[in-house]
Image (cartoon, helix red, strand yellow):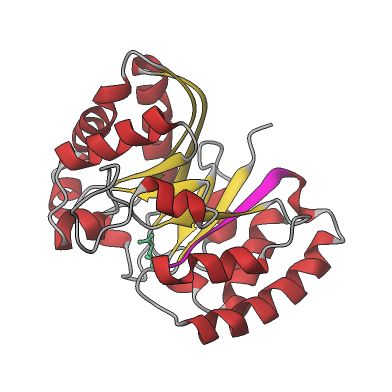
């Protein structure tokens, strides 16, 4: 069964003591939801900063295997003179089973190119041990010209070209329209559903992927989660701002599994 995903992207927030406090609350409350078998069809993913991966990993008990760890980024080279970078072995070593690739903040603030993103995707499938969460999303000017499908098709094509001829077991795409990230204005659920449907069709007609999940990101909140998550092609959400407070994120989790 394809589990739905509720993922928290902490971005560049929180210290180790913040995380201690966060998980004291989160793990206690999640136990209550767990007792109601909330998680048979749901996976929760945390993507904290690199410095917090071990701390978060330490808070996930073996029996809580519906909670997984993701890195927010990594560098595709094996090892060597790349000051400041973290490779795939290092994030695996910290317990990551997912890696976010090509978040729009990496593309726009740190100038990550389509070519670099494609290399990261290729490295992940060469290695075979983590699943990428590939982020795509159009800007407002692209959306205003109604060019979002062409734009997203191109982003998918350039990132996934290296795996075109391979049989891939699992891939997660995060559709995150840039105009919705951190703005408080999420995509309307009908527009989101349309794009997710487009992405599902696009991937299935161009790539051989056994399990594809397309999740939505951009101002997901307690207010809009129910509407988004009940759409047939929205397989989960990637939550930034609303994941930072454990009570709010717990509510998002709870509402998405109701
Ligand atoms: P947001 O961020 O929920 O704060 O809009 C989402 C993301 O960038 O992953």
Q: Residue 183: which quarter of the image?
A: bottom left
What residue is shown at x 70% (from left), y 55% (from top)?
Answer: 257
Task: Estimate the x, y position of residue 122 in percent, counting from the top left.
Answer: 31, 31
Q: Pick the quarter of the image with the N terminus.
A: top right
What residue is shown at x 16% (from left), y 63% (from top)?
Answer: 109
- In the rendered structure, the answer to whether residue 55 lies left or right of residue 72 reads right
The overriding secondary structure of the stretch rendered in magenta is strand
- In the rendered structure, the answer to whether residue 135 lies left or right of residue 93 reads left
Q: Nearer the viewer, residue 32 or 141?
A: 32
Q: Quadrant of ligand 1?
A: bottom left
Q: Nearer the viewer, residue 74 or 230?
A: 74
Is 121 within the magenta?
no
Is 44 within the magenta?
yes
What segment is highlighted magenta in the picture? 41-48
What residue is shown at x 34% (from left), y 17% (from top)?
Answer: 206
Task: Estimate the x, y position of residue 46 in percent, counting from the top left.
Answer: 53, 61
Q: Is residue 119 above or below residue 84?
A: above
């Amino acid at each position: 069964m394809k589990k739905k995903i509720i993922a928290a992207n902490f971005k560049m927030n929180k210290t180790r003591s913040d995380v201690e406090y966060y998980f004291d609350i989160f793990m206690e409350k999640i136990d209550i939801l767990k007792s109601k078998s909330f998680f048979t069809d749901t996976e929760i993913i945390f993507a904290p900063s690199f410095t917090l991966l071990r701390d978060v990993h330490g808070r996930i008990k073996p029996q809580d295997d519906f909670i997984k760890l993701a890195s927010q980024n990594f560098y595709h080279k094996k090892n060597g003179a790349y000051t400041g970078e973290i490779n795939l072995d290092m994030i695996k070593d910290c317990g990551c089973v997912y890696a976010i690739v090509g978040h729009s903040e990496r593309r726009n603030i740190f100038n990550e190119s389509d070519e670099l993103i494609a290399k990261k995707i290729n490295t992940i499938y060469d290695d075979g041990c983590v699943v990428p969460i590939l982020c795509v999303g159009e800007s407002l000017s692209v959306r205003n010209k109604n060019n979002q499908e062409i734009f997203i098709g191109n982003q998918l094509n350039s990132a996934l070209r290296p795996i075109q001829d391979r049989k891939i077991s699992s891939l997660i795409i995060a559709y995150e329209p840039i105009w919705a990230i951190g703005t408080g204005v999420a995509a309307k659920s009908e527009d989101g559903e349309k794009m997710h449907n487009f992405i599902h069709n696009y991937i299935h007609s161009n790539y051989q992927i056994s399990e594809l999940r397309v999740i939505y990101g951009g101002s997901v909140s307690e207010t809009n989660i129910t509407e988004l998550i009940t759409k047939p092609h929205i397989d989960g959400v990637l939550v930034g701002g609303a994941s930072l407070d454990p009570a709010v994120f717990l509510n998002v989790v709870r509402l998405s599994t109701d």
